[in-house]
Image (cartoon, rainbow, N blue to C red):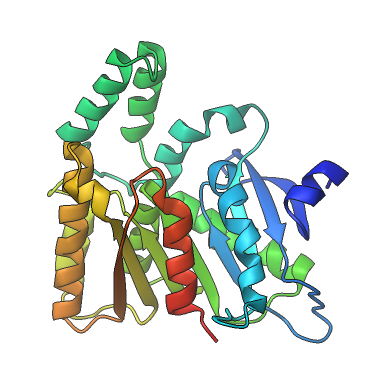
Amino acid sequence: MSTMWQGCLADTDYFELRSGRGYDYGVWVTTPPGYDPATTRAPAVYVLDGNWAVGMTAPLIVTQNDPMHPIRPYIQVSVGYAGEDAQHWARLRNRDLVPPGEPIAPEFVDAVETGIRTGAMTREDADAYLAELRDTHADAFLGFLTGELHPRIERDYGTAASGHGLFGYSYGGLFSLYTWLTGSTLFESIGAGSPGVVGADSRVFARLDELGDRLPAAALHLTINDQELLGSLPVYQNLTKNAATVLHRLTARGGAVTSAVLRETHVTGLQASFLSYLRTCRAR
């Protein structure tokens, strides 16, 4: 890593990895202060949306030395997009983070159209963004994380055999929830920040019906933001209401689920949500 980047993200390496499906991913690996796998091996925590999230989440590795609320050591693996794809991460994440067959909620389409009217995106960008939502492959991306990326992290960084975590926000939170519902055995704890369950017909609810009372053993921490619910945007109002419905259904069945309402907007909530996950699921 260059001197400039090293000053911003201490103890962080960067590499690129092409998946078996031919997609290029950028990976930032942040190790704990003074990490030495020869003496103590730490588990990995995978953080999604690395192009956006790494700068806000990787510095929180210092919480492992916080004398007031210490966090168990972990290696942070932030996963984003590389090369030309890096500039298109906001739409490519739709392909990777949304479960197969997930309906596109009308409120979400309305939010995209509002973005066009306000100049936040062009019609071309909006069409490309929505196109990725029509052919989604969270199952394939989960396979990449667990079957391709994790073995390399395990080999190169000497991770612990267990105790791994996953954190995602927004559509990343939807992916985290999807991963939990699949019963993936790699992750001991999963953080789902403002999970993008926008429609009442989400595949998440169908999966809940399929599972019945056979809930996964991994700990799940779900957060939402008060300004999502109290604000004027229907897409965020629906997101929080549906996330609350998921939470109520899980707790009614005795699921290993915790939750928090944060005083943030959807845009500003990522870092607070990650910290809430660390403090709830990974405290010493």
Q: Is residue 188 visible?
A: no
Please determine whether, in this image, residue 197 is positioned above or below residue 209.
above
View extreme (right): residue: 3
Asked if residue 173 lies left or right of residue 20, the reply is: left
Residue at image coords 44%, 56%: 168
Q: Nearer the viewer, residue 103 or 269?
A: 269
Asked if residue 63 lies left or right of residue 257, the reply is: right
* Residue 162 location, quadrant: bottom right
Residue at image coords 36%, 73%: 220
For the C terminus, which image quadrant? bottom right
Q: Is residue 216 visible?
A: yes
Q: Nearer the viewer, residue 21 or 43?
A: 43
Please determine whether, in this image, residue 110 is positioned above or below residue 245.
above
View extreme (front): residue: 68
Please determine whether, in this image, residue 168 is positioned above or below residue 63.
above
* Residue 236 location, quadrant: top left
Asked if residue 211 lies left or right of residue 153, the reply is: left
Picture coordinates of residue 62, whole percent (x, y): 66, 69
Q: Nearer the viewer, residue 28 or 115?
A: 115
* Residue 129 location, quadrant: top left
Give the number of callouts.
0
Residue at image coords 81%, 50%: 6
Residue at image coords 38%, 20%: 120
